[in-house]
Image (cartoon, rainbow, N blue to C red):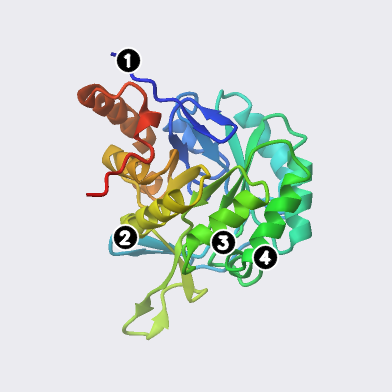
């Protein structure tokens, strides 16, 4: 038996449900030494903005129990340098490229999308409306139904490529945001972005992160992410990309049972850069053991007793 691992995220067809999450593998160049990019479902670039961003001052990353706090602040080279210096390398690989876009204004989201949609290597967009570690934009957009709807609608107007909106978990009813994305033409949602967290040095009594707060990721947030994916799948008919503390194939299956059509690996890439390949192999073995012919049949297969 050779199980079919292919999945669909709206109009996006992927060879398998394993993607590499934004902000954890740069632009793909470095991780290609550890992961065969030709075999994974896709790669999501680190957040791109219209102009280059230096990001936040260090310390920007702190390890926490079962997780990691980061406040990178969306540091990136900007879309022009990205197209000129980063895209040519990725063209060598047969891998769907999803560009993550972060912005301070609605107009910047539109302009970034408009510029990047002309590049044929770009397969789809993930619109980051929910970054918890920048002082402008980010959280304000992600916590406003009106803003998320407006960004979705206006970004869709300038591209014919799939648009995935990355949702904030720091809201009371995430399904409301998934619904507003669908109502405004969005093709899918990513759930979830990081949770807001902080940590302190007990001797100095100072924050361990210069920005004070950062985004919490890793296994610590997995139960929250699963609950959010489950909530969306129960209430809104829109494809979901599951993100949050995925460390092994069991986590992938759990997210798919809860309602995810595909998943993104994030923090695990820092621990084991080859994790995607191991997880893919284990997923294939699991499907064979369980007699699962198509992995897409697992999505939303939860049973409420």
Q: Nearer the viewer, mark 2 or mark 4?
A: 4
Query: Disc 1 designates what residue?
Result: 2
* Front-lying residue, 173 or 120: 173
Task: Give the percent coordinates (x, y) of residue 81.
Answer: 73, 44
How many numbered callouts? 4
What x and y, as percent, mark residue 56? 58, 67
Distance Cα–Cα, label 3 vs label 4: 14 Å
- State the image coordinates of residue 294 (x, y, percent, origin top left): 37, 24
Q: Secondary structure at mark 4?
A: helix
Query: Tag 4 or tag 3, which sits nearer the N-term?
Result: 3
Q: Is residue 257 left or right of residue 189?
A: left
Q: CA distance from mark 2 to mark 3?
A: 19 Å
Identify the mark at residue 220; answer none if there is no mark: 2
- Residue 51 visible within the image: no
* Residue 19 point in image, percent of width and height: 47, 37
Side of 245 relative to 211 (left or right) = left
Q: Residue at x 61, y 56 (%)?
A: 180
Count neighbours of disc 3 (C-alpha within 10 A) and say few if under 14, some if 14 to 19, many if 20 or more: many
Question: According to the image, label 4 marks what residue?
Answer: 146
Q: Earlier in the sequence, mark 2 or mark 3?
A: 3
In the structure shown, which secondary structural element does the residue marked by tag 1 occupy? loop
* Quarter of the image where one finds residue 150: bottom right
- Which SS class for mark 3? loop
Q: How many angstroms separate mark 2 from mark 4 (CA)?
A: 30 Å
Front tag of 2 and 1? 1
Which residue lies under the disc numbered 3? Answer: 130
Left or right: 271 as drawn, with respect to 240: left
Residue positioned 39% across, 56% down in the render: 225
User: Residue at horizontal 25%, vertical 25%?
Assistant: 285
**First reached walking from the N terminus: tag 1 or tag 4:** 1
Number of residues whose C-alpha sits closer than 10 Å to that of mark 4, classed few (under 14), some (14–19) or many (20 or more): few
Instruction: Report the front residue among 192 and 299.
Output: 299
């Amino acid at each position: 038996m050779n199980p079919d691992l292919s999945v669909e995220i709206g109009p996006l067809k992927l060879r398998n449900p394993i993607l590499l999450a934004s902000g954890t593998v740069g632009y793909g160049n470095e991780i290609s030494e550890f992961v065969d990019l030709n075999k994974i479902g896709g790669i999501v670039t680190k957040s791109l903005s219209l102009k280059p961003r230096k990001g936040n001052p260090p310390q920007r990353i702190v390890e926490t129990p079962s997780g990691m706090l980061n406040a990178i602040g969306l540091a990136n080279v900007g879309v022009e340098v990205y197209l000129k210096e980063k895209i040519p390398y990725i063209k060598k690989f047969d891998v769907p490229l999803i560009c993550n876009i972060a912005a301070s204004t609605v107009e910047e989201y539109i302009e970034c999308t408009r510029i990047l949609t002309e590049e044929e290597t770009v397969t789809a967009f993930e619109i980051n409306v929910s970054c918890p570690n920048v002082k402008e934009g980010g959280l304000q957009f992600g916590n406003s139904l009106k803003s998320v709807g407006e960004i979705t609608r206006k970004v869709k107007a300038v591209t014919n490529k799939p648009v995935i909106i990355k949702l904030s978990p720091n809201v009371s009813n995430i399904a409301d945001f998934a619904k507003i994305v669908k109502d405004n033409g969005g093709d899918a949602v990513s759930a979830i972005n990081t949770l807001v967290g902080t940590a302190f040095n007990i001797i100095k009594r100072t924050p361990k992160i210069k920005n004070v707060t950062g985004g919490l990721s890793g296994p610590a947030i997995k139960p929250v992410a699963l609950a959010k994916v489950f909530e969306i799948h129960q209430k809104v008919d829109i494809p979901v990309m599951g993100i949050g503390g995925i460390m092994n194939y069991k986590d992938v299956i759990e997210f798919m049972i809860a309602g995810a059509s595909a998943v993104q690996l994030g923090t695990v890439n820092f621990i084991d850069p080859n994790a995607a390949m191991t997880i893919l192999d284990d997923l294939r073995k699991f499907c064979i053991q369980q007699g699962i012919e198509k992995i897409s049949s697992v999505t939303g297969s939860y049973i409420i007793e």
